[in-house]
Amino acid sequence: MNVVVCAKVVPASTVTNQIDPTTRRLVRKDVTQELDPQAAKAVEEGLRLVDKHGGAVTVVVMGGDDATIGIRSALAMGAAAAIHLSDPALAGSDALGTAKALAAAIRKEPFDLVLCATESTDSSTGLVPGQLAQLLGIPPLTFAIALSVDGGHVTIRRQSEGGYDVVSTELPSLVTVTTGINEPRYPTLKGIMGARKKEIRKYTAANLGLGPADVGASGAREKVLTVGRPPVRPPGKIIKDEGDGGKQIVDFLAGLKLV
Amino acid sequence: MAPLVWVYAEVIDGRISRATLEMLSRAADLGRAEAVLLGPAPDDAVALLSAHGASTIYRSTDPVYRECLTLPAVESIATLIAAHRPSLMLFASSYGGRDIAAALSARLDCGAITDASDILFRDGELEATIPALGGS
């Protein structure tokens, strides 16, 4: 089976995220990048499926030149090939613009299953997978805590408010995986060496048939107006017990009409 | 004219969720509030939605909306939106709500904002407060 994994490359977890005050975007330039740990789970799940059923995993990443390091990580884990959507015209895309670019690239590939993280570690909107499935015209199964493929069907345990549901659909489909679904493998030395020889195909927005009305800041339907810090909470009241601590607490609670 | 604001009414564990009622109250502050209620719901659902500000409720009791996660709701809501043109539709940031909202934004080619903690209309545009960088 052919599995396409949508992955994001994000500032490494060791980096303190900064927002550029002019563009109001996350600073990605000159910052150490890594394969998003959430996306690594989707790569791992894809690799387990092809280990069992045969086939190949192709990773699709949208991002600047710095994203290559994360793409190589996915290839070193065992993905067979990668597609890199890299074009200044794509920078500043909103979730729907991103989904349009991913959909256009995935349509060029044979696929049975598309895997995504439930949400990225950096922007966390969680919108892209649902939008992508809609654009590809395939059913989305989200929040998988376990996944299996049998014949032409995919079945997941789907996290829910009260526990989990078992949900099944026909392939091709799109599944989003949660943090708890697996523990991603570490790349082996052989995998790391082999990754250098694997193919990374690059597409621009024009290659994908997308223009400024679809992608980039001009295509974004939302605009960040301001970025601020949350209001500072006033400090709590500290009561030191000097024999009348109990009374002070009761008086404090009575002042709030709680007792 | 007051904007028309729709709320997707969600039934969780056999009850209209608290988030649904909170969204309805906010929607009624912002403009004319209406609710969309799909699938089996408790007997008092309509009265409850109405008491929290819904002036109209679009309702179907078809169990397909419970049996299938996303697509029937997306199809139905897209059709309703095309007919009634609300300015804004609110969904809870729940497992089901986010899926439907995401699919609808792609279907209707419109913007989507997640995890809003406050919303208001200013000069015909929507302004929302959201956690930056996923709150980190």
Image: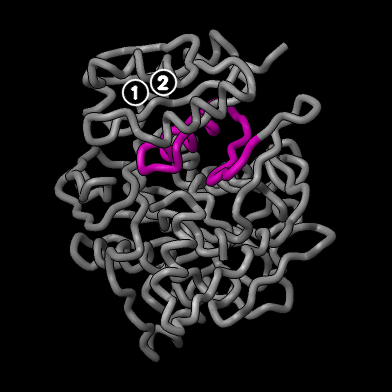
In the image, A259 versus B76, the foreground residue is A259
Q: Residue sitting at 23 percent across and 68 percent down? A: A51
List x then y, in percent, for residue A199: 51, 69
* Viewer can see residue A96: no
The answer to whether one can see residue A177 in this image is yes
Lateral position of residue A127 relative to residue A19, left or right: left
Q: Position of residue A177 (x, y in %)?
A: 34, 56
Give the amino acid type for the residue marked by disc 1 in the picture: Pro
Q: Callout 2: residue from which chain?
A: B
Residue B14 badge: none
Q: Are marks 1 and 2 in contact (CB under 8 Å)?
A: yes
Near-viewer residue (B133 or A171): B133
Question: Magenta part of the protein: which range?
Answer: B91-119
Relative to the observer, which residue lies in front, B97 or A130?
Answer: B97
Quadrant placement of the N terminus of chain A: bottom left
Question: Looking at the picture, does residue A250 appear above or below residue B65?
Answer: below
Please give the name of the residue rendered at 41% of the width and 20% of the height, measured from the top-left corner: B75
Picture coordinates of residue B135, whole percent (x, y): 56, 60
| Residue A170 falls in image quadrant | top left
Kindly identify which numbered label has been placed on residue B75: 2
Q: What element carries label 1?
A: helix
Residue at the left extreme of this rendering: A150
Q: How are the residues colored?
A: one colour
Quick check: B115 left or right of A133?
Answer: right
